[in-house]
Image (cartoon, rainbow, N blue to C red):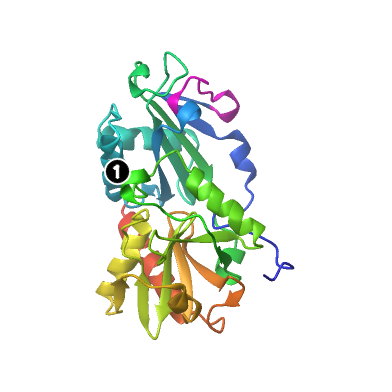
Amino acid sequence: MNSEKESHTTHDAEQDARNKDVKIYINGEIVHRDDAKVSVYDAGFMLGDGMWEGLRLYNGKWAFFEEHMDRFFNSCKTVSIDVGMTKDEMLDALNRTAAANGMTDDVHCRLMLTRGIKDKPFQHPSLSRSGPTLVLIMEHSKPVDSLSSKGIRLATVPQVRGLPMSQDAKLNSHSKLNCIIACLQAEEAGADEALMLDPHGFVNTTNACNFFIVRRGEVWTSTGDYCMNGVTRQKVIDLCRENGIPVFEKNYSLYEAYGADEAFLTGTFGAQTPVASIDGKPIGNGDRPMTRKLRQFYKDLIKRTTSDA
């Protein structure tokens, strides 16, 4: 690995002093970040028992709100957490929190819902009897320029994304230990983030984002069977289809990834982030025409879908 490069991650944002005084939503109350507290008996703190979503605010409107809420409500239903509000009520909570912070653009929100406060410090879900805990953390958050200029260095790690019957990766769970272990392994290898394989050894995802490669004018990503089916991931697939770019959700190995012309990551925060290298092997020649094209298509999509706010 080229260790003289400064390490960075897919979620590196420009420093913004306003974030020191943001107001946070907790179960209907909006308070200064210094006063935002959750009980040590909360199921999220105690067990990682909860679901979350990352959303971005552009031009006063939450991008792809319906898609994020569909995933969020489906995830909560899967693990039998009662959200306690409708999608419209969730939108109102988001908008009230943004308004309390004077936020309209380049804003990232971490929406978190746990099973709530437990009567005793044990595992059983029935011990959470007081209802869920909802927290909305919003920050002024714009990706640093180096994410799109330098790209991310990935390292393949031994930690894999598992089978659905162990912990389904489609669930945006508070329990992120699997991904954290992968990230630590990548850092120990001198990389920025981890490239994770699926249980069969095919290229799957990174510890934080979905992963794409570009080969001979085609865009490839994993089947989606063992990774978070990201909203941005699906938007890129849709944009390829709408613009006549061949796109495939398929199994492929490190052989195809190492030999790719380009590679990039997708996520709500960074949109499309180029990959500079995998396991110390540079990807392509540094020119990324397909990534640039898709980034522009995505920016245009954001503008079209949020400019009427």
Q: Position of residue 244 (x, y in %)?
A: 27, 80
In the rendered structure, which amino acid carries the disc numbered 1? Answer: Met
The quadrant the N terminus occupies is bottom right
Q: Nearer the viewer, residue 137 or 18?
A: 137
Q: Where does the magenta region start and end?
A: 32-43
Residue 12 in sight in this render = no
Q: Position of residue 111 (x, y in %)?
A: 42, 38
Could you tell me which residue is drawn at 61 percent across and 65 percent down?
Answer: 146
Q: Quadrant of residue 3?
A: bottom right
Within 10 Å of the Cα at label 1, are there few (<14), some (14-19), or many (20+) other Cα atoms? some
Q: Position of residue 269 (x, y in %)?
A: 47, 54
Q: Nearer the viewer, residue 164 or 63?
A: 164
Residue extending farthest to the front is 200
Q: Is residue 176 left or right of residue 193?
A: left
Q: Is residue 217 left or right of residue 24?
A: left
Residue 248 in sight in this render = yes
Could you tell me which residue is drawn at 74 percent across and 68 percent down?
Answer: 4
Q: Nearer the viewer, residue 63 or 135?
A: 135
In reply to whether residue 33 is colored magenta, the answer given is yes
Could you tell me which residue is drawn at 32 percent across and 49 percent down?
Answer: 164
User: Callout 1: helix, strand or loop?
Assistant: helix
Residue extending farthest to the top is 119
> Is 100 rendered above or below residue 244?
above
